Structure formats: C-alpha cells, structure tokens
Amino acid sequence: MALANRFYYIFFTTLFFLFNSCTQEPPAIPADMAKADLIPYPVALTATGSSFALKASTKIQVADDAGVKAVGEYLADKLRPATGLPLTVEVGTAEKDVIHLALGANDAELGSEGYLLEVTEERVHLTANEAAGLFRGVQTIRQLLPAKIEASTAQTADWIIPTGNIKDYPSYAHRGSMLDVSRHFFGVEDVKRYIDFLAFYKMNVMHLHLTDDQGWRIEIKSWPKLTTHGGSTEVGGGEGGFFTQEQYKELVAYAQARHITVIPEIDMPGHTNAALAAYAELNCDGKARELYTGTEVGFSTLCTDKPITYQFIDDVIRELAAMTPGPYIHIGGDESHATKKEDYIPFVNQVQDIVNKHGKQMIGWDEIATASLKPNSIAQVWASVDNAKLAVEQNTKILMSPARKVYLDMQYDSTTTLGLHWAAYIEIDSSYIWDPATYIPGVGKDQIIGIEAPLWSETVTKMDEIEYMVFPRLPGLAEIGWTPAASRNWDTYKQRLGQHGPRMSTMEIDFYRSKQIPWAN
Ligand code: IFG
C-alpha cells in the first residue's frame, strides 16, 4: 500500500475510533439498590444490579399537570445544587436519559401517598395515583443517590441511581410530629426547616402547639392582646414572639407544597395562662393573670361557666379554621387540673360543637375521651390507657403519641443536658422497638389513624437543640408510621440509620451520635 494511502488509512481509522469513543456512553456503573439505606424502608424492592446516571443532558420530564410539575420542580431544586447539573423540567414522555414523573399508576393498593419507581439504565420512571405519592417517591430518589446529594454546593460524586423496582405505600395515614412554639417561640424559618425534616422522611402532619401558659403564638384579629400581650414572653423570660396570620398562612402553604397537613392547637381549658393574662374577662374572678415564664403545668383554666368564654373560643376557632385547609383543629384538653371534672366534660362537648360548626374535626389529648366524642373526633393518646379505651368505646379513633416512646423532649439518658425524663429516658432502640398496633391491649391497628412525635420546648430554645432532640429518633418513628411491622427490624434498621449519619451531617443536622448506632461518619 502506497505511503500516502497508508497515512490516510491510519488517519481516518484513528478519527473513527476517536469519534466513536466520544459519542459512546461509558458503561453503566454496577450498583445494588438492595443495599440502599432507605428510611422508611419500602414495602417491596427488587434490585437489578446496574445504575442510571444523571448527566448534563438529563431532563426531568413531567405530565402536563400542575401538581406533577410542582413535584418535578421540587426534585430539580433538590438535585441541582450538589450536582451542578441543569436538570431542566419539561413536559414530555421521552424514553431515555430522563427522570419521568407521571400520574396514572392505577394501582389502588398505593392509595394517595404510594408510588411505583422503576429505574433502568435508560430512565427513572416514577408513577403514583396522586401528586402526593410522587412527592413521597421523590424522597426515595434522593436517598438512592449518594449522601452528598444533600449538599447546598457543587460536589464531585458518581451521581447514579441504582436500577430496580420499588412499590411503596404507607401503613398509617397520619405520620407526624408536633413542635411546641409556646414554651419557647420558634420563627417561620425554623418551622420551615422542621417541615423539611418531616418531608424527607415521608411524614405528612405538622402539629403546631400554638398556645399554652407561657405564650400565645397565633394572631387572632378579634382578640389582639392574645399576641401583643400574651405572646410577649416565654419560658425563662425571653422576648417570645408570635405568627401573624400572614406568617401562619405562609407556613401552611410551605407544608402543603410538601403534601404535609398543618394541625393548629389551641390548648384549653387548661394551659391558658397567656390568654388569661391578656384578657381579665376570661378569668372567673375578672382579674387578669400575670404573664408566666416558669414550667409548671395544670394551674390555669378558662372560666367554663361564663358565656364570654365560648364567644372567645368561637372567635378563635373561626379565624383559625378560615386559614387552615386541613381537616383538624386541635383543642388540647390536657392537664386541666384547675377545671372541675363536672365542668370539663360539658366544656369539651361544647368546644367540639364549635369546631364542627366551623367545618373542622376536633382532635385533643386523651383526656377529652372522658367527654362525649363524635365519631369523627380524634383522641391523641399520650399518657392514659384508660382514656384510650374510653375513646375506642365511643368509636373514636386514636392518634398514638405514647410519651414513653415518642416524646422527643425526653432525655436519651441521664447524661443528656436538654429535655426531661418524667415519662422515660428514650434511647434510639427504645423509640424504635415497639408497634402502635399492639402497644395498648384492646386498641388495634384499625382504630389507630397513625403516630405523632411531640417535641415540647420547656428546655429547648433554638434550632440546633431541636435537631439534637429530634434526631436520630425521628427517622425511626417515620419508619414505624410507614413501613409494615413485619419489615421493621432493629438490627437492620440501625445499620441503615448509621448510613444516614452522612446524610444528616450534609444537611447540617446536629444529631445525637448515640453509641447504639454504627455511624458511617
Ligand atoms: N405534658 C404536657 C405538655 C408538656 C410535656 C413535657 C402533654 C399532652 C408534659 N401535656 O404532654 O404540655 O409540658 O414533657
């Protein structure tokens, strides 16, 4: 072969291979979905051993539906910072190099929050019956990616999602937490961060304990001194604070965008010193109380035999219901030690009528079960098995919040510098190894709407203290609410939780590094 021809042969052959190697995809990185440290663990998962890679060309494709598009944008917001990838969101049904979100799963078993996730080397396909299901599935996608995905700045990592199939849906419809913003006030940004924690672990209820002896935290336009005076301090004498109605609506909208329901609590007839300090006429003796900055309970009561008390309650519930899209108003009812029992029962019955009149269902701590509960009311069980049985006897459903298992203000052990221990010391194993469906004899799964973990704030004053008490117990409680009991196992759970250490650290969560957990770092 002439020299020139040989040159051209070599030149074009090299060019061909160079071109090919540029355009050919690198081989997919092997990955095992079964080894993913998912919390809560899915109902069914089958790994197929390969991976889908996020690339500069990858798109998030959504159905032409507002709810689906919103989930697509949320996913993009979560994936763009750490990957630095465009991940544009567009309507479409491409088959390759896309994360595709769509409704129409048409699988009744999924309910409103379940989802189907199919990951192949070519695409990620997430479907559900409703947008809420897509939103829960997006949390799984986040957890299938490397922990660095939670960083707020660009990171170097193999942004791969292991291939396989997941079918998933929750055991309980109500899976939540409560934040006490009365003992110590926490502003809008703190509550939004708390809502983000709930969203990441597929929880769907944010219960706000808005009023108590130490502070009234929600603006009521017809009774302005509730906040201007009743919201002006807190435990320890700090400056307190409150949510204007605009701020409350902002929190409700933030929660709704994460398919989380806000349940506002106005605690009564006890735990009402802040209101009794704001308005003298609410007191039986007509004398306004002093503001209270201590941590005693059970000393205050609204005047149950004064008509103005029920006008007050009607005004408060009316204004609150008007800005609460969720089905419930929580009326507290706990520790009313200063209210005569013969007055407490008709009081609760009357408040239940007021709440129903304003189109909402009443929920209250388990003492309300001593009154005549309507079937659509809910008793939140925190201390009394007897009250739980009273509720069930009245065909009222139970929300499980047993203090000895789910109170996040309980110290981990005697060395914990924050929190209380009147109910129990609650280490990670103790908060995980229990089953709501068998916890109270005679109260079975079909009488339980779900579980909720309260964080009372007598001893908690700022976000990093909230994080220390809430984490790492919250993920386990989220799993108890979501994952079937038969799939819950302490030995495998604690391994998964250990792998969440890097995820919590990347989210800058100041969690308690329990010695019970093999932390990945
Ligand atoms: N019990 C009180 C809370 C709070 C808590 C602290 C309920 C329902 C003790 N009521 O729990 O206000 O003080 O652990």
Image: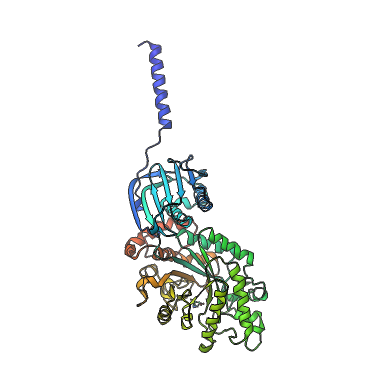
Name the quadrant of the C terminus. Answer: bottom left
Q: How is the image coloured?
A: rainbow
Q: In terms of image quadrants, where is residue 381?
A: bottom left
> At 64% across and 83% down in the image, what residue appears?
308
Residue 310 left/right relative to 80: right
Q: Is residue 319 visible?
A: yes
Q: In terms of image quadrants, where is residue 114?
A: bottom left
Name the quadrant of the N terminus. Answer: top left
- Check the image and report above or below for 42 versus 164: below
- Check the image and report above or below for 235 versus 509: below
Closest to the observer, 6 or 172 = 172
Given the current orientation, which residue lies at the most extreme top position?
2
Residue 187 left/right relative to 472: right
> At 42% across and 60% down in the image, what residue appears?
111
Residue 24 left/right relative to 226: left
Percent coordinates x, y for residue 139 in the rendering: 45, 55
Q: Is residue 288 visible?
A: no
Closest to the observer, 223 or 62 = 62
* Numbered marks: total: 0
Closest to the observer, 277 or 324 = 324
Percent coordinates x, y for residue 508 in the rendering: 50, 58
Q: In terms of image quadrants, where is residue 430?
A: bottom left
Percent coordinates x, y for residue 88 in the rendering: 52, 44
